[in-house]
Amino acid sequence: LSNLYDVSASGASFYTDQVDFAENEMFLVEFEIPNCGTCETIATTARVETLSHSVYGYLVGIRFELTEVQRKKAQNLYLCQKAEQIQQLSDTRRHRWAPPQKSFL
């Protein structure tokens, strides 16, 4: 298991403490975007970065090897994740100054 760092419609990166990832290695991957869904596909390791100041030992970047159906699913998951991030950024409770609420007296 690992901790997802970033995901796009064509790949992802994740933190792990497992040493056994090599560049250009293919493996089955399943990832979940909370409140959006999951996707399972084949991936190829694009890079492995050793982290010296982290609880995790490595940051691994992967490219998805997607079928057309998987590509559409990955795009939908990516857009769903981005929509949630945008909503969080635009949430007025998050900011120190917020426009006044309308009063219905």
Image (cartoon, rainbow, N blue to C red):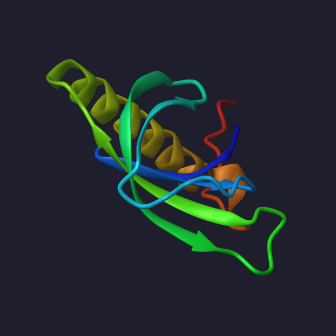
Q: Which residue is drawn at 47% across and 39% down?
A: 81
Above or below residue 61? Residue 83 is above
User: In the drawing, does residue 67 fall left or right of residue 37?
Assistant: left
Percent x, y for residue 18?
Answer: 71, 52
So how many labels did they put on this image? 0
Residue at far left of view: 68
Image quarter for residue 21? Answer: bottom right
Image quarter for residue 95? Answer: bottom right
Q: Residue at x 49, y 22 (%)?
A: 38
Above or below residue 90? Residue 51 is below
Image quarter for residue 83? Answer: top left
Observer-nearest of 72 and 103: 72
Which quarter of the image is occupied by the C terminus? top right
Residue at far bottom of view: 52
User: In the drawing, does residue 6 fall left or right of residue 66?
Assistant: right
Q: Which residue is drawn at 68% across and 44% down?
A: 2
Percent x, y for residue 99?
Answer: 60, 57
Percent x, y for residue 1?
Answer: 70, 37
Percent x, y for residue 79?
Answer: 35, 38
Q: Which residue is drawn at 33% across and 32% down?
A: 74
Above or below residue 13? Residue 47 is below
User: In the drawing, does residue 61 fall left or right of residue 41?
Assistant: right
Above or below residue 34? Residue 2 is below
Observer-nearest of 63 and 101: 63
Observer-nearest of 45 and 38: 45
